[in-house]
């Protein structure tokens, strides 16, 4: 026993000396190295890309940026508030709009006078006419299609832009089925996919202001009798009917679905531009014919939701105004400028991180068909979103669960509508 | 073994065989997940998804996942940090909790009776209830987070209850007072009695607690996440999550990362296993 | 009498103070501070915390979701405690009797416990949703063709199975420690007196093993009531929130819904429920313990 205890003691001491972990090192304020700042990343899949970008940044400017990540299952809001509460606020934090609305007046620096405001225009996050956050990236979503697979199955070239109503979409699905692709749709089961992204079209396509939508939702929405709500569920019903995983819809695997879309076993997936890396892993070629169809709402072919797709800035970056020193804040601003204006910054953002920039001066061409489609649609004004609207932080979780029940056949449309009304009535 | 002298009857042989079979079946159930993970850690992600059971994946077997995991996790540095935290936290916990248990068992007074019950009760407090207060007191007010020493001492605080509880039970049932009284008469000091006579007798329990604590500390995720945010200080479990994206996870690399994380503990366990058996056997002979 | 008291105080300072100090700093003080938080409506961020009195507790008492979660957790705890302790006890017994390859088996059974919570859930999620389904499809074994995690009942059992898998080796170890410490003399004396087989187990071994049973039951109870990591990565409360155990409910209330006061109040209720059950369990167990 004594031997064991002394062994442990020795090992611990060895660990201390050999693998010294910078216990008492001060955050290097060495004047030779430049200022050190930290960046909280809530987009797990670009963690490695961001680290590479930070390296490149340091090589060019000798300023160090430490990229902090949110672990799996870690909610960014919790992570950032914990860091602030423990006195370790990140200099920059990349968060969802809903988090920023909740935190800006306690944490965020006013960025209205930054140079890039002119490059991002209305994409910036402003409250009371002050810009509080930099739009980190633009993402778009709709119904991803595999054009090659469709054309092959039907033995003709389908003009995807001619599909501009739920009726036509349904007809296309029927035709695919008749020609051998029995279940052409991959319906993801994830609660954030169903609750935030699919249900989200209801909000994105709203035609008045975000404030008014917020009021309407809380005043007793009556989804059961709402035309748009029903249209949305009609489209969802089509997805369910032609779902490849119809036998076990809640057992559908995200990666497997991406693979099926990539190799043409299925032709449609309601998702967004972030899906490309998964599809690429599944074998999808960048030169292949992939793109977005709108998420159809009803049959009015002149309705914008049937011809345009949703695209908007999805993540925003705030600079710490509460705990960071003047130097650190300046260094943080410099980093954002580097992202927007420097050649390396622009190029790596598009190619390493595979993201679409919200700054109009970034002309680096996109390398994958999904992002290309979105950039093109953005340029032609073929996108829509509702600025300033952010659903409450538990929306995706609660409504996602309700949608899952519906998809699994455990609840019906009326019950889904009731959950929707109940949820919004509860909100303040 | 005491039974060596008896001849086993047929009945006993059958029972023994049945027991062995039960053990083997349960054992296979327990091992199956490990086999799946190790098997799949050598495969490419696309193969894992297509057919997790396959023994002949299309992209073949390779060590690539392990290389990616090793680099991505900054394995050596994380390993060192885990070692530091786990090692010191375990040593300190063993020492303090055995001392506390000794006091609670040997000295009967209102305080010890009260503590005996309530320390155990404290184990019920869910960690979630302590998270934010903990961080706001020691972070915002005292600013001592982001240090491995703080993590070590916090681990000690949280593990006191379990260690004391287990030592208490053992001391009560297995350490006769007579030994200590004899030593007292011989003029030994109190610390002397404890460390030279009582503590060595706690062998099996100490061994068990070492294992339990080492495991708890090595694998702990939530507390280190709160305390350590500087990259250089991260422990092994924290670095495993580098491979989880927002939407899906890099299966192959994660499995390799898991294998790498668990390997040191496995080795330690096999080494300690002998010591435990040895310790117990020599104890029995006395 | 005063001398005795001084002696106790001195011994207390010598032996109890270091451990108690850290215990107080890390557990007691935050606990009481947290209690204060339940009397506010703090949202985790702003510096002001408005006093709201006992309203958080009233809200919690009236929240059906919370109590549903609590009931589900109780059901889960009962199954886990029973299965883990029965299997653990049996395994501990079988592996203390000189079975061939005993050491090998002991190490083997303990290995599941080496894996930490979050990754454990992930691995089993992979097993249930992909491996077992693949097995089901190729063997035609009906109940495996859809993932167990897609439907509330089977997802519940998945949680139980995974927890049992993780804990059984841990408890087995404690039981082994108890079995090996059992004085051989007592066992031999019992055999000489004519107690054999089941009778021996019931009247001699089991009472002597009471300390181990108490410890193991308590530990399993505690772990099971507060399970969060496995819940998160195995089912994430799904499908559609049908497997949200209590710790997850508390966590979500505080961190997803940002209602820290209520979350903390729920945590206090959880604490009370578990405390009452545990104290009863330990007291009844301890009273049956036999001192050496």
Image (cartoon, rainbow, N blue to C red):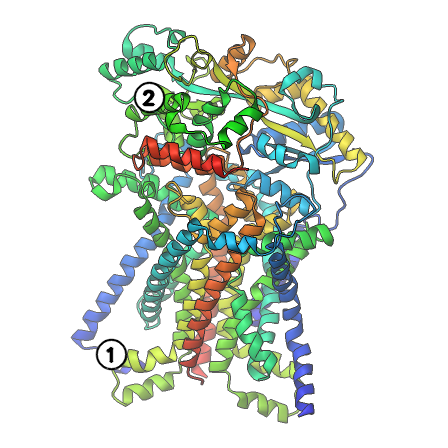
Q: Which mark is residue A284?
A: none
Which residue shows up at 58% across the image and 49% down it? C260
Element type where label 1 sits in the image: helix
Q: Between residue B262 and residue A175, name the one nearer to us.
A: A175
**Residue carrying label 2:** A266
- How far across and how far down the image is residue A132, in percent? 69, 28
Q: Between residue C119 and residue B278, name the one nearer to us.
A: C119
- In the displayed orientation, state which residue is furthest to the right: A31
Of the 4 image quadrants, the one containing the N terminus of chain B is bottom left
Tell which subunit mark 2 falls on. Answer: A
Q: Quadrant of residue A334?
A: top right
Q: Quadrant of residue A389?
A: top right
- How far across and how far down the image is residue C55, in percent? 56, 53
Judge left or right: residue A326 versus residue B96. Answer: right
Mark 2 burial class by Cα count in 10 Å: few <14, some 14-19, many 20+: many
Q: Between residue B181 and residue A149, name the one nearer to us.
A: A149
Q: Which mark is residue C197?
A: 1
- In the displayed orientation, state which residue is furthest to the front: A219
Taking C67 as reference, is A322 above or below it?
above
Q: Is residue B24 visible?
A: yes
- How far across and how far down the image is residue C130, in percent? 33, 39
Taking B89 as reference, is A141 above or below it?
above
């Amino acid at each position: 026993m004594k031997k064991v205890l002394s062994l442990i003691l020795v090992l611990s001491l060895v660990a201390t000396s050999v693998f010294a972990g910078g216990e008492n090192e001060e955050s290097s304020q060495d004047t030779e190295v430049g200022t050190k700042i930290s960046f909280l990343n809530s987009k797990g899949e670009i963690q490695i890309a961001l680290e590479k970008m930070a390296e490149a940044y340091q090589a060019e400017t000798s300023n160090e940026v430490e990229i902090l990540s949110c672990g799996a299952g870690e909610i960014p809001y919790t992570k950032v508030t914990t860091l602030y509460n423990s006195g370790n606020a990140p200099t920059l934090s990349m968060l969802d709009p809903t988090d920023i609305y909740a935190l800006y007046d306690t944490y965020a620096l006013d960025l209205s006078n930054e140079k890039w405001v002119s490059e991002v225009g209305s994409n910036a996050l402003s409250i009371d006419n002050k810009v509080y956050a930099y739009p980190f990236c633009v993402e778009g979503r709709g119904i991803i299609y595999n054009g090659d697979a469709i054309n092959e199955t039907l033995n003709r070239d389908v003009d995807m832009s001619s599909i501009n109503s739920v009726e036509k979409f349904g007809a296309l699905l029927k035709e695919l089925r008749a020609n051998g692709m029995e279940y052409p749709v991959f319906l993801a089961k994830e609660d954030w996919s169903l609750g935030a992204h699919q249900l989200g079209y209801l909000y994105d396509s709203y035609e008045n202001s975000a404030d008014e939508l917020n009021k309407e939702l809380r005043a007793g929405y009556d989804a059961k009798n709402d035309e748009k709500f029903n249209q949305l569920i009609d489209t969802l019903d089509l997805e369910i009917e032609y779902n490849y995983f119809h036998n076990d819809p809640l057992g559908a695997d995200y990666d497997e679905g991406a693979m099926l879309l990539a190799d043409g076993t299925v032709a449609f997936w309601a998702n967004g531009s972030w899906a490309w890396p998964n599809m690429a892993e599944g074998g999808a070629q960048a030169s292949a014919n992939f793109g977005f169809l709108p998420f159809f709402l009803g049959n009015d072919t002149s309705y914008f939701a049937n011809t345009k797709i949703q695209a908007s800035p999805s993540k925003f970056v705030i600079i710490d105004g509460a705990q960071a020193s003047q130097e650190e804040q300046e260094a943080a601003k410099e980093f954002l400028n580097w992202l927007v204006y420097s050649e390396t910054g622009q190029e790596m953002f598009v190619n390493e991180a595979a993201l679409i920039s919200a700054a109009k001066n970034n002309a680096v061409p996109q390398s994958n068909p999904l992002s290309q489609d979105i950039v093109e649609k953005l340029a032609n004004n073929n996108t829509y979103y509702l600025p300033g609207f952010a659903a409450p932080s538990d929306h995706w979780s609660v409504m996602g669960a309700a949608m899952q029940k519906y998809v699994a056949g455990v609840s019906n449309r009326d019950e889904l509508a009731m959950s929707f009304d109940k949820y919004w009535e509860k909100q303040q | 073994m005491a039974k060596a002298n008896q001849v086993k009857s047929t009945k006993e042989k059958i029972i023994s065989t049945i027991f062995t079979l039960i053990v083997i079946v349960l054992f296979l159930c327990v091992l199956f997940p490990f086999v799946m993970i190790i098997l799949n850690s050598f495969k490419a992600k696309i193969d894992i998804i297509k057919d997790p059971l396959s023994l002949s994946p299309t992209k073949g077997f390779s060590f690539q996942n392990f290389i990616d995991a090793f680099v991505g996790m900054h394995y050596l540095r994380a390993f060192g940090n885990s070692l530091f935290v786990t090692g010191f936290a375990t040593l300190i916990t063993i020492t303090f909790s055995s001392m506390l248990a000794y006091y609670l068992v040997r000295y009967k007074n209102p305080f010890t009776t009260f503590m005996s019950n309530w320390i155990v009760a404290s184990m019920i407090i869910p960690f979630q209830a302590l998270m934010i207060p903990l961080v706001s007191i020691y972070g915002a007010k005292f600013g001592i987070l982001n240090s491995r020493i703080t993590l070590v001492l916090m681990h000690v605080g949280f593990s006191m209850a379990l260690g004391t509880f287990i030592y208490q039970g053992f001391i009560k049932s297995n350490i006769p007072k007579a030994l200590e009284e004899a030593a007292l008469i011989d003029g030994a000091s109190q610390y002397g009695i404890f460390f030279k006579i009582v503590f060595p007798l706690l062998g099996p329990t100490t061994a068990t607690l070492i294992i339990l604590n080492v495991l708890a500390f090595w694998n702990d995720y939530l507390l280190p996440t709160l305390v350590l945010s500087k990259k250089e200080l991260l422990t092994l479990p924290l670095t495993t999550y580098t491979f989880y994206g927002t939407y899906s996870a890099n299966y192959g690399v994660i499995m390799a990362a898991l294998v790498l994380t668990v390997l040191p503990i496995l080795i330690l366990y096999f080494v300690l296993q002998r010591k435990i058996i040895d310790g117990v056997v020599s104890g029995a002979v006395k | 009498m005063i001398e005795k008291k001084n002696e106790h105080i001195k011994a207390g300072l010598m032996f109890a103070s270091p451990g108690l100090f850290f215990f107080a700093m890390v557990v007691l003080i935050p606990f009481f501070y947290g209690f204060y938080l339940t009397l506010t409506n703090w949202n985790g961020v702003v510096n002001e915390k408005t006093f709201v009195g006992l309203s958080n507790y009233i809200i919690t008492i009236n929240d059906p979701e919370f109590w549903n979660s609590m009931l589900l957790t109780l059901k889960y705890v009962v199954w886990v405690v029973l299965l883990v302790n029965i299997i653990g006890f049996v395994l501990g017994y079988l592996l203390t009797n000189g079975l061939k390859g005993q050491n090998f088996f002991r190490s083997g059974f303990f290995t599941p416990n080496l894996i930490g919570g979050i990754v454990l859930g992930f691995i089993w999620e992979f097993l249930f949703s992909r491996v077992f389904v693949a097995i089901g499809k190729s063997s035609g074994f009906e109940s495996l063709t859809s993932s167990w995690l897609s439907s509330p009942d089977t997802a519940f059992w998945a949680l139980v199975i995974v927890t049992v898998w993780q804990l059984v080796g841990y408890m087995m170890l404690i039981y082994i420690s108890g079995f090996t410490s059992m004085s051989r003399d007592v066992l031999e004396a019992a055999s000489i007196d004519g107690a054999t087989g089941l009778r021996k187990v019931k009247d001699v071994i089991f009472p002597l093993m009471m300390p181990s049973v108490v410890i193991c039951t308590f530990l399993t109870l505690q772990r099971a009531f507060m399970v969060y990591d496995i819940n998160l990565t195995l089912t994430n409360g799904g499908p559609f929130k049908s497997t949200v155990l209590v710790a997850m409910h508390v966590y979500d209330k505080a961190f997803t819904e940002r209602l820290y006061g209520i979350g903390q109040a729920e945590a206090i209720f959880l604490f009370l429920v578990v405390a009452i059950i545990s104290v009863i369990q330990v007291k009844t167990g301890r009273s049956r313990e036999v001192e050496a």
